[in-house]
Amino acid sequence: MSDSTEFPIWRTAEGEPVSCVEKIKVLNENLAELRELAQEALEDAVLMGADERQVREVLAGIVEGLINPYKKQA
C-alpha cells in the first residue's frame, strides 16, 4: 500500500477476501479518509516545526491503541 490511491484486498478473519461490494466500498472510503486526515496532520505539524519522525510515531501509536469492541472475550 505505498501509493495513496491503492487499496488492499480486504480479508475476513479467516483470510478469505471480503466479497460484498458495499462493504469493500465503505472500507476503502474509511481508509481514504484516514489517509487524508493523517496527511493533513503531518503537514500541519511539520509546518509548525514539529519533528516528522515524532509525528509519525504518534500517529502509529494511535493505530496501535485502537480497541476492537467486537473482540470475543477469552
Image: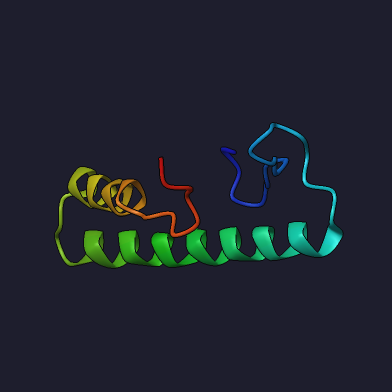
> Does residue 4 appear to the left or right of 68 in the view shown?
right
Q: Quadrant of the N terminus?
A: top right
| Residue 69 location, quadrant | bottom left
> Does residue 73 appear to the left or right of 59 in the view shown?
right
**48 or 29: nearer the eye?**
29
Residue drawn 63% across the image and 38% down it? 13
**In the image, residue 11 lies at what x, y percent?**
70, 40
Asked if residue 16 is positioned above or below residue 62 in the image, the reply reads above
> Does residue 53 appear to the left or right of 35 in the view shown?
left
Q: Quadrant of the C terminus?
A: top left
Residue drawn 48% across the image and 48% down it? 72
**In the image, residue 44 lies at what x, y percent?**
28, 68
Residue drawn 70% across the image and 44% down it? 10
Residue drawn 69% across the image and 41% down it? 12
**In the image, residue 45 lies at what x, y percent?**
23, 63
Q: How many marks?
A: 0
**39 or 48: nearer the eye?**
39
**In the image, residue 4 lies at what x, y percent?**
59, 50
| Residue 38 location, quadrant | bottom left
Q: How is the image coloured?
A: rainbow
